[in-house]
Structures are given as C-alpha cells and as structure tokens.
C-alpha cells in the first residue's frame, strides 16, 4: 500500500531545485529550462517529506488535431512522464500513489477527451501493464559520450536553420502533427527558440521533406524530434546537426527505423536503454489512428 505520510503538492518555479534533484538522481537529462517549461504547460504533482521533494509525476495535455478527409477530431493526448522517486525513498509506493492520482484526474468528465500515453522503461512497464496500459511500439535511446563535430556529407536537400521563423514554424508544426498525431506547436516553438542553430528544415524547390529539432540537456544534447519522409532525408538532417555539436549526444530512435539506427551506429553511437510507448484506451473512446508519418527520433520520453 502506498505510503500516505508524504504531502501531495503542486510544485512551482520555487521548487525547481528539488525537481532537478529528482531527475539528476535518476540520471535523466532535464535542465532548469525543461522543468520550467513542463511546469508552465503541464499538470505536475510531487510528494514532499520534511521540505524535500521525494517523488514527481507530470501530465502534459497535447491538443487534438482535425483528421482528414472527414475533418473529425482525433483524441487529445495526455502525456504522462517524469515519474521519479529519490533512490532513498523508493519502495514506499510513491510512484504508484502519484500515478493513481494522475489517472483519477484523467478519469474526471472534463478530461474524458484525453488519451493517456507514456514511454515506459523496462522497470516501469510491468507497473503500467497492471494499470491497464498496452504496448504500442518500442524505441531505443542511442548515445555518444564523446562526439566531435566533423564536416557533413553532401546533401540532396537544402538544410538550413529557420531563417523565416514564422514560415518554417508552420512547416515544422504540420510535419510533426503528421508523425505525432496531436498538436505540439508550443513545444516545437520553444525548442526552436532554445537551439536555433540545431533547428533544421530539409527543402528542395521550396518543398519540405523533414525537420530536426534539438535541445541542450544536463548531460547531453538531445536530438529530436526528427521527422522525415524517408530515411535518407533523416540521415541528412542528423548528419548536419552532428556537424554542429561537440560532446555527449542522445537520440531516441523507433525500433522500426533500422536503416537510420544502423547509420547512427556507424557514427559511433551505442544503445543505452529501450523504451516502450504505451497507451491506456478508454472503452468509450476511439483509439488513436496510426499517423501518416513515423518519426525517426522522438522528442524524448518526457515529451513524446
């Protein structure tokens, strides 16, 4: 039974140090900017003991998009993430308590339009299966701890950082919706502002073929999301981004994208850990349709 002694709170910016301590203790990659954005746009809850944050969870609501050709509306996504517990406080049921609190909120009538989705580690997957989540697909985090920039290969497409932010943002929004199945415009705009030199759009004759965004992390630069119409374009985008980065790099690649993963391995990346994307289907809610495009790299398990 979960330990009820810890106080349930809604963290604020004043709690950033405690939230950073939670993600650092789990060896995760979040920075103050990441946590501040998640606090501003998600529903964060934490457990506090003796003025110390000991556990956290987050629900990010991603708005629905109109689907073609009927223009009916797909389910909005409720992204559950940042399920963290300080090592010395594990085994007390804190994660279960916070997950059950989040799921209870999602079952309220006002949230019935939200489809709960998350990315599970191997340790977390059995817990989520017991809560009714089912597997969708898997991806692997690849890492390079000592990457050094090098000149990129020759490219078929014009790969440039957005020079017309308003125009290129619309392209990024559209392609991401096709791959993700919900509207993450606010996140995408934030990533482009945070790392403009790593915000790349692949074009030929003014037609967009893909994009890549990235963000600086606590221990590594995170590449993703990366969406492209084919694996060669995905490789071009990643190659260009890597030509601009020194130091550790993470990239989370769907297991179905074997050609792209093989290329990443050829650049010195090694698998770090697997994840499973899972969803909790409400019997009264239509399942999320398969997106027209599959991403070549996700934004990270905390963001989808």
Image (tube, rainbow, N blue to C red):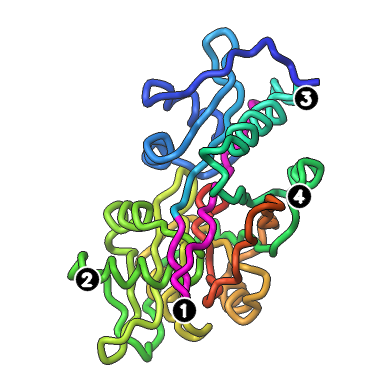
Expressed as whole percent of the image width and height from the top left, the position of residue 58 reads 54, 37
Q: Name the front one of labels 1 and 3.
A: 1
Identify which residue is drawn at 28% across, 63% down: 197
Which callout, 2 or 3, points at the residue further toward the start of the chain?
3
* Left or right of 219, for residue 243: left
Separation of residues labelled 3 and 4 (CA atoms): 17 Å
- Asked which quadrant contains residue 276, the reply is bottom right
Near mark 4 (Cα within 10 A), the count class, few <14, some 14-19 or many ≥20, is few
* Left or right of 128, for residue 40: left
Which callout, 2 or 1, points at the residue further toward the start of the chain?
1
Expressed as whole percent of the image width and height from the top left, the position of residue 256 reads 66, 74
Separation of residues labelled 2 and 3 (CA atoms): 50 Å
Identify which residue is drawn at 53% across, 77% down: 292
Expressed as whole percent of the image width and height from the top left, the position of residue 286 reads 63, 60
**Residue topped by disc 1:** 69
The stretch of residues the image draws in magenta is 64-87
Q: Give the structural element (helix, strand or loop) at label 2.
A: helix
Q: Give the structural element (helix, strand or loop) at label 4.
A: loop
């Amino acid at each position: 039974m979960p330990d009820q002694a810890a106080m349930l709170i809604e963290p604020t910016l004043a709690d950033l140090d405690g939230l950073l301590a939670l993600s650092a203790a789990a060896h995760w990659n979040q920075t103050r900017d990441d946590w501040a954005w998640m606090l501003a746009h998600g529903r964060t809850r934490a457990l506090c003991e003796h003025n110390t944050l000991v556990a956290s969870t987050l629900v990010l609501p991603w708005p629905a998009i109109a689907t073609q050709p009927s223009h009916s509306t797909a389910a909005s996504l409720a992204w559950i993430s940042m399920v963290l517990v300080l090592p010395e406080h594990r085994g007390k049921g804190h994660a279960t308590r916070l997950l059950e609190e989040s799921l209870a909120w999602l079952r309220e009538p006002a949230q019935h339009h939200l489809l709960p989705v998350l990315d599970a580690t191997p340790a977390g997957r059995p817990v989520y299966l017991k809560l009714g989540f089912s597997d969708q697909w898997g991806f692997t985090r690849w890492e390079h701890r000592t990457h050094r920039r090098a000149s990129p290969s020759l490219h078929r497409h014009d790969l440039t950082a957005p020079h017309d932010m308003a125009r290129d943002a619309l392209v990024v929004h559209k392609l991401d919706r096709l791959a993700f199945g919900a509207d993450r415009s606010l996140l995408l705009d934030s990533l482009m502002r945070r790392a403009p030199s790593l915000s790349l759009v692949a074009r030929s004759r003014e037609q967009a073929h893909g994009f890549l965004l990235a963000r600086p992390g606590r221990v590594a630069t995170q590449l993703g999301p990366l969406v492209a119409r084919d694996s060669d374009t995905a490789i071009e985008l990643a190659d260009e981004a890597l030509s601009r980065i020194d130091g550790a790099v993470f990239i989370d690649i769907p297991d179905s994208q074997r050609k792209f993963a093989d290329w990443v391995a050829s650049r010195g990346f090694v698998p770090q850990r697997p994840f499973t994307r899972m969803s909790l289907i409400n019997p009264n809610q239509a399942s999320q349709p398969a997106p027209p495009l599959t991403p070549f790299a996700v934004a990270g398990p905390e963001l989808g």
